[in-house]
């Protein structure tokens, strides 16, 4: 068996995982490099001092600092990602009347250009975030950085990128002369350009150890120095080898995607280039940009596809978030499939793998099992004919296309449930619900982040009995979690005893080797179950809390062994910046209560800026920083992979990219004038909020009318003697149905 290597902290470490005989060697024989694009430009303004220093602190020890070189009127070199400085500086407000229009590679561009300003003039200009979806709280804080200042940031390596040599030459500025002058005082590891002739002009004067890299743009774009398309040059790698050591290509050159953002088969570019003696670097890695649905919004998974796919490994990755590629290379690459990982945290699914499939469907549950989930969950709802099913909400509008079904006329407002214009599971029989199409959840549709459209209405719903059979047959699943909500309402107003149905179903399932956990936000449900079963009971706190008094925790301890709290109950934030960590976890654990946290999602907009748009960083901070016992997640694959992380358990030797974030560290960097108003602290959980009235007896309801068995009709809830105020919609609200339908897509 051939022994290959993986990196830890920038150095090789041999490993003997079971799949290494499939791994090809890299051209250089070294670990892939992480190139920090303008530093940590996904968080701070590109090419700012903070971006470079942050990249150096939270990346691999041999991270390479990337600088896009632009020349000023007096031939000084500055780092800026675009010719048009208005894209990432405040120059338009400093020099409002000094904009210009230039032809750049045949395209007319209007803006503010470095060639129109001296270095002294640019000293009054500050950097801003050039991507509008990224944090802007650090705009105007950091000055423009010159190339000769970068060595002061102690870069492990330096990469100079020259995009527009032809443009500068047309303005009587020599980029070649500038780069040669840098060589005299600074060690430059890489120089890249998208222009062949510029690189050729450096070959004869290249210092030992400096590599030239030819940068490819879009295949139909043209290299202005030789007037050839990059697509045509791609087929002539032997020509590239005559003047360059490697190539830098958009990641889509290696893993193309189709028009619907699904991966196509990988190309042979990496192996072809390696055969030609060229290193291959991939660009365009950004955690907050769209990438293939195949990666489930997980940027670590995307990076691993370029370095750990069994067929090839790129020599480096150019990223706006270098911490992610650092994790992928050092902590997750080439981990054998049979590695079990650490015991904590417990990975608990939320409606199965509901980030990839419609929740609580057979596909979602099978996906979660395949992902390596520990605990498979079923939120129980009751049908009209008394069957317990798995569904994320009692309101069918939340997770099905019932609004487009023959049952769309059953909209009802139930004030006790706090739901207006809903269609409820207890209004339909199980056979009727089976006719409904499921709908994938899209919690961030407002951000134009849609979950996998291929599966948006795929899968079948399951009864609790079917769910338990599936879980029982999945040997990798260590237990099941049953959620019970609305038990008091169902008993009093629908004549349905959900707790007894769940207990009977569990007894019939005979789960002898798997643990059974039951959770609820209602303490009376758990109190009843405590008397009638030996299952592990979990109390769900359904509000953000800042702590809990001893009496409330003591009360919880009487009926539960674990507590589920929200993410915001652990880390508080203000405008998406973490401000502090509460003592909620420590307080609960002091009473021997396990603490699970919900809900983890992979979409970057679900995470505070401190987590760098990386779900792995977020999970690590809750586990290693806050010490939680389990994560409740819609993407169990990400959490299950985290547990196999080889960078865990290293104590003081834990690398920075796997160190928990420090709440408040970014918030403190925000200028006082940009700080948002302080927010009120989360309230304490009190005993009064925990203790609830016992469950009411199950009502005996009058039998439904004789004609109620029609396949497309169901009766609305029946009033009890308590005279629950129920408003039944005779004519359904068209607007409510329309909104409910559109929200699913």
Image (cartoon, grey):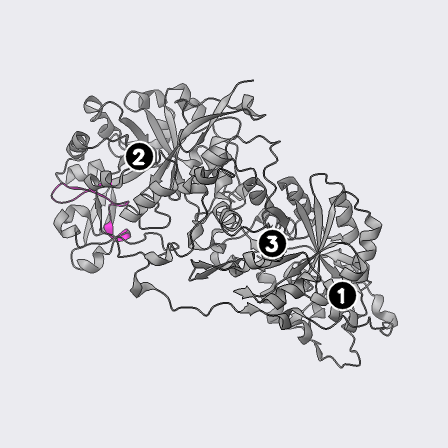
Q: Measuring from the top left, give residue 454's x and y in whole percent.
A: 60, 46
Q: Measuring from the top left, give residue 439's x and y in whole percent.
A: 64, 55
Q: In what element is the residue under mark 1?
A: helix
Q: Earlier in the sequence, mark 1 or mark 3?
A: 1
Residue 158 higher or lower than 628, as above or below: above
Q: Earlier in the sequence, mark 2 or mark 3?
A: 2
Q: Give the range drawn in magenta.
A: 69-87
Q: Which mark is residue 156?
A: 2
Q: Is residue 362 left or right of residue 27?
A: right
Question: Answer yes or no: do the residues labelled 2 and 3 have beta carbons within 8 Å?
Answer: no
| Mark 3, residue position | 596
Q: Which residue is drawn at 43% across and 68% down?
A: 679
How busy is the neighbourhood of tag 3: few (under 14 within 10 Å), some, or many (20 plus)? many
Question: Answer yes or no: do the residues labelled 1 and 3 have beta carbons within 8 Å?
Answer: no
Q: Which mark is residue 426?
A: 1
Residue 179, by quadrant, is top left
Q: Measuring from the top left, give residue 450's x and y in whole percent.
A: 53, 52
Q: Is residue 93 left or right of residue 133?
A: left
How busy is the neighbourhood of tag 2: few (under 14 within 10 Å), some, or many (20 plus)? some
In this view, the residue in front, 289 or 504, is 504
Q: In what element is the residue under mark 3?
A: strand
Q: Which residue is drawn at 49% across and 22% down?
A: 4
Q: Magenta stretch containing residue 71, yes or no?
A: yes
Q: Magenta stretch containing residue 317, yes or no?
A: no
Q: Distance between the Cα atoms at labels 1 and 2?
A: 63 Å
């Amino acid at each position: 068996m051939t022994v290959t290597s993986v990196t830890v902290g920038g150095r090789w470490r041999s490993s003997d995982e079971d799949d290494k005989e499939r791994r090809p060697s890299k051209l250089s024989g070294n670990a892939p490099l992480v190139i920090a694009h303008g530093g940590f430009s996904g968080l701070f303004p590109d090419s700012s001092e903070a971006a470079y220093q942050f990249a150096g602190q939270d990346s691999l020890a041999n991270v390479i600092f990337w600088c896009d070189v632009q020349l000023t009127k007096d031939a000084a070199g500055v780092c800026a990602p675009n010719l048009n400085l208005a894209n990432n500086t405040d120059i338009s407000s400093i020099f409002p009347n000094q904009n210009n229009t230039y032809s750049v590679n045949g395209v007319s561009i209007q803006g503010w250009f470095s060639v129109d300003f001296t270095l002294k003039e640019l000293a009054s200009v500050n950097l801003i975030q050039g991507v509008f979806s990224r944090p802007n709280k650090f705009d105007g804080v950091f000055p423009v950085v010159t190339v000769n200042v970068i060595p002061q940031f102690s870069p492990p390596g330096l990469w100079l990128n020259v995009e527009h040599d032809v443009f500068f030459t047309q303005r009587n500025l020599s980029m070649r002369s500038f780069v040669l002058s840098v060589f005299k005082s600074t060690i430059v590891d890489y120089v890249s350009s998208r222009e062949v002739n510029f690189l050729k002009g450096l070959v004869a004067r290249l210092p030992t150890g400096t590599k030239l890299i030819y940068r490819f743009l879009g295949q139909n774009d043209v290299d202005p120095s030789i007037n050839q398309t990059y697509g045509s040059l791609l087929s002539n790698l032997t020509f590239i080898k005559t003047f360059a050591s490697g190539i830098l290509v958009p990641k889509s050159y290696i893993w193309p995607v189709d028009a619907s953002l699904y991966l196509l088969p990988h190309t042979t570019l990496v192996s072809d280039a390696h055969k030609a003696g060229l290193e291959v670097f991939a660009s365009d890695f950004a955690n907050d940009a769209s990438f293939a649905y195949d990666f489930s919004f997980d940027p670590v998974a995307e990076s691993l596809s370029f370095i750990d796919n069994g067929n090839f490994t790129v020599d480096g990755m150019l990223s706006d978030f270098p911490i992610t590629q650092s994790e992928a290379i050092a902590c997750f690459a080439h981990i054998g499939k049979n590695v079990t990982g650490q015991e904590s945290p417990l990975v608990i699914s939320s409606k199965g793998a509901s980030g990839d499939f419609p929740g609580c469907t057979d596909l979602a549950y099978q996906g979660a099992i395949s992902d390596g989930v520990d605990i498979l969950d079923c939120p129980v709802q009751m049908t009209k004919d008394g069957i317990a099913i798995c569904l994320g909400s009692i309101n069918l509008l939340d997770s099905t296309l019932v609004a487009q079904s023959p049952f769309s006329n059953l909209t009802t407002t139930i004030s006790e449930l706090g739901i207006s214009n809903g269609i409820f599971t207890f209004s339909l029989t199980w056979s009727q619900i089976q006719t409904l199409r499921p709908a994938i959840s899209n919690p961030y549709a407002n951000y134009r982040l849609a979950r996998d459209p291929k599966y948006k209405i795929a899968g079948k719903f399951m009864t609790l009995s079917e769910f338990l059979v599936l879980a029982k047959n999945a040997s990798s699943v260590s237990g099941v979690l049953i959620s019970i909500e609305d038990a008091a309402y169902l008993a009093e107003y629908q004549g349905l005893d959900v707790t007894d149905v769940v207990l009977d179903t569990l007894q019939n399932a005979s789960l002898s080797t798997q643990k059974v956990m039951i959770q609820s936000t209602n303490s009376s449900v758990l109190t009843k179950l405590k008397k009638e079963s030996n299952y592990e009971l979990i109390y769900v706190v359904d509000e953000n809390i800042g702590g809990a008094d001893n009496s409330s925790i003591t009360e919880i301890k009487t009926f539960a062994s674990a507590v589920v709290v929200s993410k915001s109950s652990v880390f508080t934030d203000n405008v998406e910046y973490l401000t502090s960590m509460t003592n909620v976890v420590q307080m609960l654990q002091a009473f021997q209560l396990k603490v699970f946290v919900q809900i983890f999602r992979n979409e970057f907009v679900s995470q505070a800026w401190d987590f760098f748009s990386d779900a792995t960083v977020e999970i690590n901070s809750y586990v290693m920083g806050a010490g939680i016992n389990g994560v409740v997640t819609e993407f169990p694959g990400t959490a299950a992979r985290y547990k196999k992380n080889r960078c865990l358990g290293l104590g003081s030797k834990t690398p920075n990219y796997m160190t928990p974030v420090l709440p408040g560290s970014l918030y403190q960097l925000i200028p006082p004038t940009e700080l948002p108003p302080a927010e009120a602290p989360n309230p304490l959980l009190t005993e009064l909020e925990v203790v609830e009235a016992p469950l009411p007896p199950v009502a005996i309801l009058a039998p439904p009318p004789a004609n109620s068995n029609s396949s497309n009709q169901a009766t609305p809830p029946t009033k009890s003697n308590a005279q629950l105020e129920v408003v039944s919609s005779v004519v359904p609200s068209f607007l409510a149905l329309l909104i409910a339908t559109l929200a699913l897509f």
